Amino acid sequence: MSRVYNFSAGPAVLPEEVLKEAAEEMLDYRGTGMSVMEMSHRSKAYDTIIKEAEADLRELMQIPDTYRVLFLQGGASQQFAMIPMNLMKNKKADYIVTGQWAKKAYQEACLYGQANKIASSEDKTFSYIPDCSDLPVSEDADYVYICENNTIYGTKFKELPNTKGKTLVADVSSCFLSEPVDVTKYGVIYGGVQKNIGPAGVVIVIIREDLITEDVLPGTPTMLKYKTHADADSLYNTPPAYGIYICGKVFKWLKKMGGLAAMKERNEKKAKILYDYLDESKLFRGTVEKKDRSLMNVPFVTGSDELDAKFVKEAKEAGLENLKGHRSVGGMRASIYNAMPIEGVEALVAFMRKFEEENR
């Protein structure tokens, strides 16, 4: 069985050489006589794995010493509660709602204090990013929250919002490590790894030191305090050890590929192939305003539910997997994360051309 081109939004495609290396080490990790899956997280071998993973991530993102890197569990969705529990000192936060995940984060924050929706693109099915240059940021807001790349709707903040001096918190799950980033512009930058970095089960939180305090909302569970995990170097309890090990391998792969500037160039090239075709096609069209298009997630439609379903079915038969759009929007979506080779995008466009000729 040859490998398919997997356009899934997550869990998603991983670099083939990372999978091969993990396979080689599956039964015996570097002479330990055991798999990383079986290894104590307190062992010397594992200590090296997690420390190296953090060091490589710091190097890739140029993370300053004033920020902590935490490898946590519960996915990005658990952060929807952890963020207000840890950061809502004034019980007030501002949310920019540009998709389903930002909306869920906003709804969760409403449980802990006053969450204000200061901008939204829900009026046009989240098909654009609102102008965030002069928003009504609350005087006493503890933070301003965004989801930087919207997996379902295929939009991306090309410019960060003007938070008027307030701490910016960003969910970067689906654009993590896809391009260079200035970490100092954020108070918290976090994401689930199952889209661009590793297997499901790990969430990485990069948080500025001064935001990690004992002063959290009353009733915050020990496991949901950033301080608990920061003080224990992400080893307060058993971490998602194998997932972190794979993330570490992906970091090394990214360094080998030339780092984040090289990835951005590669991702722009891949996305251009697909968007250029969508812009000229008479059958398919993209659903996002051009200026806000994501490099990672590309939603498109034919305008007919019947044809959409036919396309997804025939694409699967041609070895192009997981192209069905999210259930909330329908249509198709191609997620073309870091590990998707350019050949995969070329194969998709060739198939789309053929489909268009046959179904015009």
Image (cartoon, grey):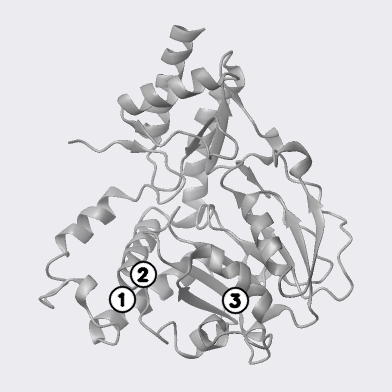
Numbered badge on residue 49 = 1
Residue density around tag 2, few if under 14, some if 14–19, many if 20 or more, within 10 Å: many
Nearer to the camera, 151 or 110: 110
Separation of disc 3 and disc 2 at Cα?
A: 18 Å
- In terms of depth relative to the viewer, which is nearer, 327 or 334? 327
Q: Position of residue 96 (x, y in %)?
A: 75, 56
According to the picture, the residue beneath numbered tag 3 turns out to be 207
* Mark sitting earlier along the chain (3/2): 3
Which residue type carries mark 3? Ile
The numbered disc on residue 244 is: 2
For mark 3, give the secondary structure.
strand
Task: Determine the CA span between mark 1 and mark 2.
Answer: 8 Å
Q: Earlier in the sequence, mark 1 or mark 3?
A: 1
Q: Is residue 40 left or right of residue 327?
A: left
What whole-number distance in Å separates the C-alpha atoms at marks 1 and 3? Answer: 21 Å
Query: In the depicted view, which residue is nearer to us: 55 or 300?
Result: 300
**Label 1 element class:** helix
Q: Up-down: is 336 above or below 330?
A: below
Q: Tally the numbered discs.
A: 3
User: Residue 135 vs residue 177: left or right?
Assistant: right
- Which picture quadrant has residue 254? bottom left
